[in-house]
Image: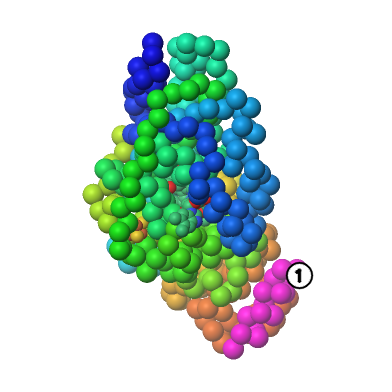
Amino acid sequence: MDTVSFTKSIKDKALGLGFDLVGVSPVDSFPENQYYKEWLRNGFSGEMKYLDRSPEKREHLQHVLPNAKSVISCALNYNTDCSYSVDEKDKSKGWISRYAWGDDYHEIIEDKLQILMNHLKEEAPEEVSSKLYVDTGPVLERVYGKYAGLGWVGKNTCLINQEIGSWIFIGEIITSLELDYDNPVPDRCGTCTRCIDACPTDAIIEPYVLDSRLCISYLTIELKDRIPLELREGIHNNIYGCDICQDVCPWNTRAQITDEPEFKPRDDLYNPDLSYLSGLSVEDFRYVFKGSPIKRTKRRGLLRNVMIAMGNSGDKDFIPHIKECLNDEEPLVRAHAAWALWKIDGSGSKEILLRRNSVETDDKVNEEIDLLLNTD
Ligand code: B12
Ligand code: SF4
Ligand code: SF4
């Protein structure tokens, strides 16, 4: 089989496995790789230290696979037929990001890529070495997606496909085979700035550049410690990730719906009740989030975020739940419960907070309470 027919057969296989998009690019040092180093130098990766470790691998994939020649990029649509966060006004509910309503995408995509990689090895005209990654590898997945023709990198930094929008995950196979390459598609953002205007924390500091330290997705998922006081209000009711800069994107107005049943919302995770989540024990958390991407924050991270959403709601009905969390076993949760109480009840909470022995304190909680009491 010649290169063109062989590449086509691989793409057919990928589509047959359920991927919505597939394309192929050469392994190269693309101009965007330079932005990555600048991004790291500016500190935009925050506490995600794993991103700092291997910029040279991202720039030269031969450091990942010595004779790497091509990257087969695949995308899977995760959009379900549910409303967008910007249209949901009930602030007594939390918002979990669209991508996390169902099962963990890493496993779903990895399984499909493994089958595709076996097929590649079996059918290849020569000895082949290959590696697959979904999300966690040292690959600039959006950039490779762009050069494989899957879409363009928008001003919100997401990969957007003209037909199906940006609710897509990306995974890829790096291989030693030379294949028939696709061309990148043009940038279709034009003069639009909706994502930049809508971002509540101004995390898109200029078109195509995101400062993770300001992004709600980073703050609620990746940051493991206390969330900076000045950023909490902007988080509103987002308790795991954020969809806003994609909700407002015109290319998602008619986004297609996924065929994958695993991405359908699990019970209670679409626009969930905050008081239900604040009452989850360690065992409940393990049970509810088994196989879900949400287990990444651990219980303490999720409850920290729930406390922020409760505080932001201004709803006094949450006070008994927040008070329960003032005695949580996790200092991180107690600290954010103190903030939530202060946010809803202002001077009413001061007494409780001043009587520190009513809250089981440690350095983290003490520091938080000092900050709050010095705020007004
Ligand atoms: C770290 C990370 C994050 C960080 C940082 C995000 C970011 N924009 O960099 C945080 C935690 C904030 C995050 C959030 C999200 N993430 Co994320 N994340 C990653 C990860 C692991 C690495 C991304 C990275 O290297 N960032 C560094 C920046 C510099 O690179 P980049 O975003 O690829 O940007 C390129 C372009 O913007 C361009 N560029 C940069 N500057 C400039 C300047 C100019 C002038 C120009 C022209 C171009 C340009 O070059 C850059 C590469 O050098 C990837 C997986 C992977 N291995 O790639 C997933 C990934 C990017 N995330 C993904 C998802 C789904 C999300 C969320 C939607 C989850 C959510 N709902 O909360 C949000 C989206 C937020 C957003 N607007 O980006 C998907 C994206 C799918 C898509 N359609 O694009 C990926 C690919 C995971 C996957 N395998 O599917 N994520
Ligand atoms: S995910 Fe949310 S916080 Fe992050 S850039 Fe987009 S709108 Fe802003
Ligand atoms: S909202 Fe507008 S500027 Fe932002 S990514 Fe979509 S098309 Fe581009």
| Residue 65 drawn above or below residue 194 | above
Residue 197 or residue 363, whichever sits in front: 197
Dividing the picture into quarters, in which one does residue 207 lie? bottom left
Indicate the position of residue 182 as horizontal and vertical percent values: 37, 33
Q: Amino acid at mark 1?
A: Asp
What's the residue at 56%, 75% (across, down)? 230
User: Which residue, as the protein is rendered here, is positioned at the far left?
Assistant: 254
Instruction: Give the x, y percent position of residue 48.
Output: 63, 53
Query: Residue 197 placed where, x, y %?
Result: 37, 69
**Viewport quadrant of the C terminus:** bottom right
In this rendering, does residue 182 appear at all? yes
Q: Is residue 144 above or below residue 122?
A: below
Residue pictured at 54% horizontal, 23% vertical:
176
Q: Quadrant of ligand 3?
A: bottom left
- Eyeballing the image, is 119 above or below 350? above
> Which class describes the residues within 10 Å of circle 1: few (<14), some (14-19), or many (20+)?
few
Q: Is residue 362 magenta?
A: yes
Q: Which residue is mark 1?
A: 363
Segment colored magenta: 361-376
45 w.r.t. 101: above or below: below
